[in-house]
Image: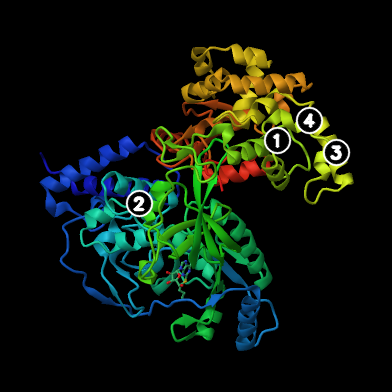
Amino acid sequence: MAAPPVQAYKTLVKELQYHNHRYHVLDDPVISDGEYDRKLSLLQSWEHAFPDLIDDDSPTHRVGGRPLSEFSQISHSVPMLSLENAFDSDALMDFDRRIAERTETQENVNYVCEPKLDGVALSLLYRDGVLERAATRGDGMIGEDVTANAKTIRSVPLRLQGDSLPNLIEVRGEVYIPHEGFELLNAEADRLGDKKFVNPRNAAAGSLRQLDSRVTASRPLVMSVYGLGILESTVKPKTHFEMLTYLKQLGFLVNSHTYLAANIFQCESFYEQLAKQRSSLPYDIDGIVIKVNSLEIQQRMGAVLRSPRWAIARKFPAQEEMTRLVAVEYQVGRTGVITPVGRLEPVFVGGVTVRNATLHNQDEIARLDLFTDDTVIVRRAGDVIPKIVRVVKEYRRANASLIEFPQQCPVCGSEIEQVPDEAAVRCTGGMRCPAQVKQSINHFVSRRAINIEGLGDKLVEQLVDRDHVKSFSDLYRLDLVILCSLERMAEKSSKKLLKSIHASRDTSLSKFIYALGIREVGEGCAQILANRFQSLEALIAEPLEKLTEIEGVGPVVARHIVDYFAEPKNMNVIDELLSIGLNCHHKVDKENSSRPLAGQTWVLTGNLDSMSREGAKGILKSLGAKVSSSISAKTTKLLVGSKAGSKLEKAKLLRVPTMQEREFADLLVSHNVYPEHKTEI
Ligand code: IVH
């Protein structure tokens, strides 16, 4: 191979740096991944043949180099400080008051609010625009040299951009792993039988401190910058906000939720706002950082011990806390699935008092290696169901015993069977199991099903326990005498309930199908079936093969539908309901155009945690959207679950907006749609 002209080499380095910045910092790529890879391999081949050419800022360093035997130490010429915390609004007001006192000002102080990213701090030193050294925070005074590792992080510029390059600049920021990357990383660890990471922060910290930078290169790290150590430049920002703008111009990633506040009250509102968005952000944050905007005031304020007086962290309530497991109880759901639930000593976590946490299934109990009385770490993020993430084995009591999953149904004593292809087990008791009867009735009467107002689960419990109700049709045989005999039921409330039972007879086909509680037939699917068949008889008569072909149904659900109607007991219940006068005529759906997602086309990729894909599709359709199986430029949105595949890549390429499951859940709630959750608690 003939040596390329030095200029051609440098141009290619620059070009790759440009595309890297477009992709990893601006999230706005120009060329395809394939094109990028081809350019990179050309550069690699040049460097391989002519090692003298290699520049310090060559993008080939991003793949990592030879492993080190240890990190060398680096002393920070400007200490890397930490932050004081404010856990409530009063502490924030005190902070503002202290600043006013010190600066002897009556006027409002301007602040910059930034998300407090939950990762690890990193310092980057650039001389004449080229990344020279990267160091961890260490104890704030002395850190470790992780230059080779930092170079593998795509959002870390190897060379700065623009015309006003500083002679010397030391930039500080947070290295973190977004949720999507974290899930992929753990899925991979699972596949290889490796230990999984506890949380994205630990994964980020571990990845940054790898002696082998090729390992770091394989981890989906991101760096977002928020401050300076040293600056020797002709550009002299006067405020923190100007400084962040300058950093952005130089090619760094600055978090998009950075906000300039005119006073401390606006900081508090920003905090409230971000707290609401927290669970739908694609990365972990544990609060906001509030910084005095004027660099001159920052200077005057100085620092106490290890934290500056001009900044404070307004923390969100912790999402993980420690508590004690009081008992494990087993809930039997509508379809017989047995869900273990941990009863906990009450603990304030994620902003609420938590008393119960899901344990999912027997595999989860085994994974946790749970013993009686164990001290456990409970996590509650956003609105998700609290879960036990791990056991603190150091605190295990000497006489504790292993928690064992029951071998029979804990309610009716029937045999337990494994649900095919799932970790769950199910009670085989069917309608002989009082728990299943109660749950089925609760579902049948719920608002989005038959909708019997005033019939809560406490009443259902009594009605089943006292043998007044064994199946749906029994509800329509209840009378005033029976209802008045129940606890906390006077004549007036009993009459009201009878009225709403009566009113519930006039329902729609889709609600009726949903109310039957056929396995995996959620609201969306019921709607699809009602639209398609327009009568119950037509649905019952449909053969399996035909049902399977319906978009939004699929083979598994189709099998459940056919099995349900093939069971004589179920047909008896339906006959009884119809003979009582239940009216389930198909009501023509509202005009498509009036539905909230009318005119939109959605595509799904990956696995959803909280609902089935079919369920999500059905719901999208019921909201008026079209659901397509492939991405095109016309796609409105890509709904991204875990283990997302090539569709996500394609969406990025075509710049189709994506939505994570958490945001999707919020969207559904905003349209009053509450999907059937996979987990019951
Ligand atoms: S400023 C002089 N800004 O939080 C102020 N820190 O608890 C030093 N962190 O060590 C830090 N996001 O690792 C600052 N927007 C942000 C931050 C942030 C996360 C971390 C950082 C720091 C720790 C202090």
Q: Which residue is identified by label 1?
A: 469
**Residue ID at (60%, 88%):** 102
Gap between marks 2 and 4 measured at Cα: 61 Å
Q: CA distance from mark 1 to mark 4?
A: 9 Å
The residue at which mark 4 appears reads as: 477
Mark 4, other Cα within 10 Å: few <14 / some 14–19 / many ≥20: few
Please, what is the three-letter code of the amino acid marked with disc 4? Arg
Circle nearer the N terminus (2, 3):
2
Residue 543 location (% of width, % of height): 53, 12
Position of residue 174 in the picture relative to residue 336 (left or right): left
- Residue type marked 2: Pro
Q: Is residue 278 left or right of residue 190?
A: right
Callout 1: helix, strand or loop?
Answer: loop
Q: Earlier in the sequence, mark 1 or mark 2?
A: 2
Pointer 2 residue: 220
- Circle 4 sits in a helix, a strand or a loop, which is it? helix
Nearest to viewer (mark 2 / mark 3): 3
Q: Can residue 439 be spotted in the picture?
A: yes
Kindly give the residue lying farthest to the right in the view shown. Answer: 492
Cβ at disc 2 under 8 Å from ligand 1: no
Q: Is residue 376 above or below residue 559?
A: below
Q: CA distance from mark 2 to mark 3?
A: 64 Å
Determine the image quadrant of residue 74.
Answer: bottom left
| Circle 2 crowding by C-alpha within 10 Å: few under 14, some 14–19, many from 20 | many
- Image coords of residue 53 (percent x, y): 16, 52
In this picture, is 187 found above or below 472?
A: below
Foreground of the two, 354 or 116: 354
What numbered label is drawn on residue 552?
none
